[in-house]
Image (cartoon, helix red, strand yellow):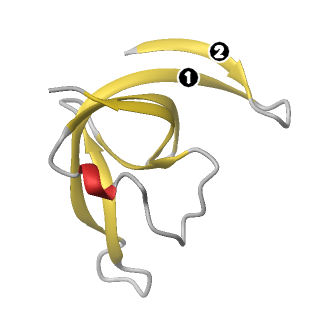
Amino acid sequence: MMSDQQTDNNGNGYTLITIRGKLEPRVFGRTTKSEHWGVYIVTPAAAYLIRPLNSNPFMHNPLEPLCGKTIEAEGHIHDYIFFAKRWKVVE
């Protein structure tokens, strides 16, 4: 993992990191009223719900068609979500 200190448009600091992992569809929020399918990036160290930075969490995830592929993504982690600023398929 590589990191680089960045600032968003509101002046909030966060660390940009680059991770590589396989995208997998998984159930998010199992046994809750908000249970639904989500796209996860799975690395040897952890699995994170992934979505594009500044995307609407209630809309279709544009990374879904890439499920099953390995990607390298740059972004930041907040709790259990990886917010991807950019990504590319690597295989």
Q: Is residue 54 left or right of residue 21?
A: right
Q: Position of residue 48 (x, y in %)?
A: 35, 46
Q: Is residue 72 left or right of residue 12?
A: left
- How many numbered marks appear? 2
Pick out the residue farthest to the right.
Answer: 10
Q: Which mark is residue 41?
A: none
Q: Amino acid at mark 2?
A: Gln
Task: Point out the image quarter for the N terminus.
Answer: top left
Query: What residue does disc 1 label?
Result: 16
Residue for point 38% across, 83% down: 32
- From the viewer's perspective, is residue 40 above or below residue 21? below
Under mark 1, the amino acid is: Leu
Q: Secondary structure at mark 1?
A: strand
- Vertical order, 33 against 84 (above or below): below
SS type, badge 2: strand
- Within the image, what quadrant is residue 12 found in? top right
Residue under the point 52% across and 70% down: 59
Label 2–label 1 contact, CB within 8 A:
yes
Q: Is residue 49 above or below residue 13?
A: below
Question: What residue lies at 42% left-to-right and 21% top-to-bottom?
Answer: 18
Q: Position of residue 74 (x, y in %)?
A: 47, 26
Mark 2 highlights which residue?
Answer: 5
Which corner quadrant of the image does residue 60 belong to? bottom left
Estimate the x, y position of residue 23 in percent, counting from the top left.
Answer: 24, 46
The x, y position of residue 10, in whole percent, is 85, 37
Q: Quadrant of the C terminus?
A: top left
